[in-house]
Amino acid sequence: MTTPAVELIDVRKSFGHLEALRGVSLRIEQGEVVAILGPNGAGKTTCINLMLGQRRPTAGTARLFGLSPEDRRARSRCGVMLQESGLLGQLRVRELVDLFGSYYPHPLTPEKALAMAGLEDQSRMQASKLSGGQRQRLYFALAVCGDPEAVFLDEPTVGMDVEARRAFLDVIRQFGESGKTIVLTTHYLEEADELADRIVVFDQGRVIADASPSEIKSQVAGKKISFVTDAPVPEAYLAGLGVTRVESDAGRVRMLSSTPEDVLWRLHQCGVEIRDLEVTGVNLEDAFVSLTSRQTAIGS
Amino acid sequence: MSIAELKFDVAPLPSVMWKQTRAQLLSSLRIPAFSLTTILLPIMFFAFFGLPYVHQTIGNTNITVGPYVMASFGAYAVSSAMVFNFGIGVAMARGQKMDLLQRATPLPSGVAMAATVVNAMVFALISLIALFAFASIAGGVSLPVGTWLTLTLRLLVGAVPLIGLGMAIGYAAGPNSAPAVTNLIYLPMSFASGLFIPVAQLPAIIQKVAPYLPTYHYGQIAWNAVGAPTESMESAVIWLGAWTVLFFALALRFIRLDQSRKFS
């Protein structure tokens, strides 16, 4: 068995009374491309911060390449893009890439790192004058300039417009294809689906799913049912029908089910009058929402 | 499962130190508001307070104004480079969250700190050389070579407690309040220590406070170098040592607080 890039063993993390992580165990092998997916506040950033030794677990163990994440030798194998961070803004793009490269034992040439991030034309610009998208590219260049084996990207495309995001995703995909380990957090599903060969879904500080993108989707293979009704539908009516997510607002009820025909038959039997019925297939968005939300009673 | 199969490698520290220092220097030099004030203010003060009277003597002593005032503003130049570099520089770096990404890289935090010290020392040295050049060319101040060197060395080494003061401010104050806090502490302190006007010419109440201030004893080691001390070297060094311990203890406390907020 080879040493995993990342290993979390029953890790918990509290900030005062807030429990950000409630017992997470996760093993990421070298060469894997893993997306950590979840809504805001699910614990994604806390998780990546523990992997990198930016924060210490309240309980449990975090290891980076088999060492303490705070060990300089472990960090020398990792490149990092954080959600919130600043730079010596008076330095030029190339100067920063050269500086960050010098922190690592076998850095790429600044030109190579800039080419990977698509920043060749901005190499002489001051970092503080870059646009939002260029700034993210610079952070990516800083993450890869040390030629690390693993990169950790915390919400890498946040604040980018659609076009910049698409181009930037290509950059990350190319990097992943070179056999490097990538761990990224995101709340964009298409990002996770497009880049990762494994998706770990977080909700409320726990891992609620850990599988390939297609398996994640198949876990909620089924249909989305949507209709309008005047009276609330008691939850008990739907027991045993594989209904995973129910919500209602202003008389419109939406739910997911693997057996939509049975659901409609049951509603009819129970005398629920429905109008404006739609039954559609689920996309990854629905699958994700269904995994992360707890069931709520109809009409409540 | 073993870690023996992985080859661990790290960048050599001297080259990391060199690049980090160079980057921080470049970055500071490119903020003219910072680099120019550090270099020009002491010269300006010398021009106002010393230049018109360079060859006169102070009060009824036989101390010449020129070297005395130059030593005073030399002390002002170096101590302000230290206090402002660390006080405002560290607070701004924290405000812009530079410390977050830096901590995630393999850059050892000691190297980043050492680079900041070297950065402040280089600025201090540049402002000293500029002040000395101005004093000798425009004011005709001349000293034996050994005295120039002694003065420079004492000013740089003696400024260590002021690094502690700057660090304490930089880790305690926010990025917006740091400039005000630094000025509020540092300016009255250096004034009351006789760096602008000799202590003997200050109001009686301030004369009573002065001998307790760190910049007063710092000024003494400079005045001692040009032959105009009012305190023995031993006493000044002991006072500076005590202030060093106090300021660094304070700085360490604020650093720990800051680190535990962000990284624990």
Image (cartoon, coloured by chain):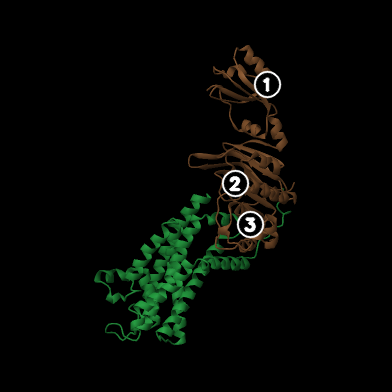
Chain colours: A brown, B green
Of the numbered discs 1 and 2, the one sitting upstream in the chain is 2
Question: Secondary structure beneath disc 3?
Answer: helix
Q: Pinpoint the chain carrying mark 3.
A: A
What residue type is disc 3 on?
Leu
The residue pinned by badge 1 equals: A260
What residue type is disc 1 on?
Pro
- Badge 3 crowding class, 10 Å Cα cut-off, few under 14, some 14 to 19, many 20 or more, is many
Place residue B219 in its image quadrant: bottom left
Q: Residue at x 54, y 44 (%)?
A: A58
What residue type is disc 2 on?
Val
Q: Pinpoint the chain carrying mark 1.
A: A
Inspect this view and state whether residue B45 appears: yes
Distance, label 1 to label 2, CA atoms, is 36 Å
Inspect this view and state whether residue A106 appears: no
The residue pinned by badge 2 equals: A158
Horizontal relation, residue B24 to residue A116: left or right: left
**Label ID, residue A142:** 3
Depicted A17 relative to depicted B133: above or below? above
